[in-house]
Image (spheres, rainbow, N blue to C red):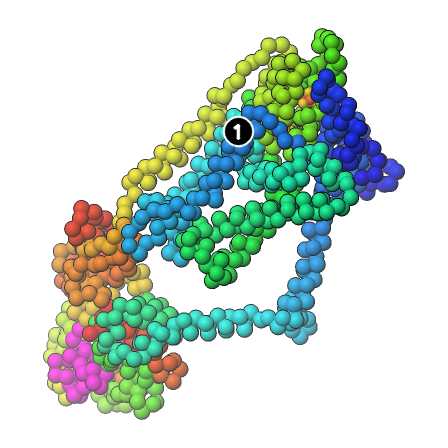
Amino acid sequence: MTTMENPGRFKPEDFLVEAAPGVAKHDVEAVRQPKSKKPATDADGLSKGSWAEKPRIYSKLAKGNFRNAKWIVMLVTLGIYYLLPWLRFDRGEGLPNQLFLIDFANQRLLFGPIEIWAQEFYYVTGLLIISALALFLVTSIAGRVWCGYACPQTVWTDLMIAVERFWQGDRNAHMRLDQGPWTFEKIWKKTATHISWLLIGLLTGGALVFYFRDAPTLAMELVTGEASTVAYAFLAIFTFSTYLLGGIAREQVCIYMCPWPRIQGAMLDHDSLWIAYRDVRGEPRAPHKKGDTWDGRGDCIDCKACVAVCPMGIDIRNGAQLECIQCALCIDACNDIMDKVGRPRGLIAYTTERNMESRTAGPRDGLRMIRPRTILYTVVIAITGALMAWAMISRSDLDVSVLPDRNPLFVKLSDGGIRNGYTIKIVNKNQTPRRFKVELTGIDGLKTTIVGHDDASAPIDVGPSNVKALKLFAALPRDKAKALNAESTPVTITVTEVDGAVSATRDTSFRSPGP
Amino acid sequence: MTMAGHKHIDEVTGVETTGHVWDGDLCELNKPLPKWWLYVFYACCVWAFGYWMVYPAWPTLTGYTQGYLGYSQRAAVTAEVNAAKAAQDTYRQAIANTPITEVKGKEDLMQFAMAGGAAAFGDNCSGCHGRGAQGALGYPNLNDDDWIWGGSVEQIEYTIAHGIRNGADEARNSAMPRFGLDGILEPAVISDVANYVRSLSGSEQVDADAAGRGKATFAEQCAACHAEDGKGNQEMGAPNLSDAIWLYGGSQEAVTQSIVTGRGGAMPAWAPRLDPVTVKMLAVYVHSLGGGK
Ligand code: SF4
Ligand code: SF4
């Protein structure tokens, strides 16, 4: 950067310029100006040959309702993320007592009383589908709510910026520090910032690994150096990536790495809420002097408070931009200014494209939340949710699968009889041991045996949260086999809990040479 | 390419273009990638060069570049296999020390033996006996309950270890005379005997007269091994002729052919190729297929 104003270059005298009585004009130029009214310059940070610099953005702390909402969302989401692995849930002897645990070794996902086994991963798939659809719905109603408030990239970046402000001060102080020489104060403030970021990263990575193993045990192991290499590797990866993405890269992730800003365009229409500068009301912009009339001019006093708070380094007054994550901080900044100069709030506000247009032409249209698009998303969410709920409610704590032998389909015995083999898997999803009886019915005279057991009616014990595989043989004597006269005869395998009401039946077939 | 001093600015957006023009007036806005992206690309190039240095990477005329780390996938696999074997050692030891008849009663050993047996069967036995041990003409079905050399787990273990008619002394050896080829019996007599043999298992398509004629010859020539009632003798590997299972087929033609040639299939000995624990696991596996005695 060589010529003209540089957003990173602090000039104290500029802060003395007033946009309105008592309202300083910020020396800030949006670092990204895709719709610049003037020809592009080096200061735009964009059109400098083939490669773009990473602009330094000093976002000022905003104050207002949206900033408060963002603090609350940050507190809740980070609170859940950091604390969830520490919550306990008693599942009984020998089973993990962590409320939420992704148990890779035993291939299951535990959440309170719910146990999701690897073969039931469709529940998780269903949840992901619902989440994606909910994201579509929210986006079509209110734009990038996810980006602005709840996305981990936004939340952690927000946290990192808050920490940076804590050590190095808000925008002006921070810029002064950066412009100044490398004094002892500057060195320790910078060091403290980076150490804090790394500690946050360490906590983030630490919390992540706790989801996969009993948290208190793993915490001890991590400290004493006994944890597995995988745990340390993931800890290191997440520490580093949190530091890098939240502390250093920040808006670059949203602009260059994330696909979501590109995809969401497909969900937005004229009636989606969107953060916009109401140029009809704001223009022509100009500084306002005490006693001047507001007639014949716009409400925008060109103080650039909205630009100063923007974490993405853009000027919302240039219109909708890919970079805007719709964090609403510029709304807070501008409302504050409007209060000071005694004009109505909402010069920058959540509005829709239709309202912006109708505003230009005349009266406002109001909000249209119920549209074919939102109805469609809602219906699909409802259907998926209902299916999931039904599957979850009707989910049995006993799962039986039967696999008839295919190679060979049947075995001819020395007495001329026919024998079939079945592999039966009994899944006990209860957290107590259970006892079952296995029965095969459908053909008279079938003699069944279970490999490893003395007789076919022997009770089968299945441990808590466990699977038992059995081999069942069913033999039919010669005359009966001859009488079958079919290549395949339907039979039923029933698994019944010995002292319980639960049972499961599976239809399968008995194969024979046929007519 | 953008020419220095030849900057073209798009009028609508105020953004510089790349300088390319298509169809006379179509330009592309210059939206440059960030510098860090370029540096990441350079870093990847450096990484690639480093990788080429330390790992096997490029083919040469006679082989490939080895890399300074001396890494080889073959060595890695061998190490993994050895590690897996070491992990199996406790079980293999326990199986080696357990009499084969008692393996079935110990659930963990049984599970290990079944898995190990199934794997060894797929590698070594399925070529002849089929993946499901279902056998084929001349290769016994191991799922059924008809055993030529005995179906107890010890007998199966011996058969696997030493094989059948493979020339070794310990092998299960026996030979049926080539009644036809060596001219011991006349073709007509052989046909009668074949009818008689087939009648033993209750076949309906038997020429009763011929069977009647064959009975005496059977008593004279065959009963010594296959027993008077045709139930066979597992000591000498003489198959049971009165059951429904025919190793070489039960038609008049097939049985005649068996008497003419004497058959006599062979099986290799596995003790010289597999370790004793694997043979033991194979026996347990085969025994559990459904017909074990
Ligand atoms: S839109 Fe509001 S905050 Fe932004 S420059 Fe205008 S008055 Fe200031
Ligand atoms: S323009 Fe406003 S809403 Fe968009 S990112 Fe900047 S501050 Fe947030």
Q: Is residue B91 above or below residue A280?
A: below
Q: Is residue B248 magenta?
A: yes
Q: Nearer the viewer, residue B213 or A164?
A: A164
Q: Whole-percent x and y of residue A360?
A: 65, 13
Q: Is residue A455 above or below residue A166?
A: below
Q: Whole-percent x and y of residue B157?
A: 28, 80
- State the residue position of label 1: A69
Q: Residue furthest front?
A: A184
Residue A462 in sight in this render: yes
Q: Quadrant of ligand 2?
A: top right
Q: Nearer the viewer, residue A116 or B279?
A: A116
Q: Residue at x 74, y 9 (%)?
A: A291
A472 left or right of A128 in image: left
Q: Nearer the viewer, residue A450 or B99?
A: B99
Q: Bounds of the magenta span?
A: B221-250
Q: Residue at x 30, y 39 (%)?
A: A393
Q: Is residue A484 above or below residue B185?
A: above
Q: Is residue A131 magenta?
A: no
Where residue B100 sits, quadrant-wise, is bottom left
Q: Residue at x 22, y 86 (%)?
A: B236
Look at label 1 and name its amino acid: Ala
Q: Whole-percent x and y of residue B121?
A: 35, 72
Q: Whole-percent x and y of residue A251?
A: 64, 38
Q: Residue at x 42, y 53 (%)?
A: A216
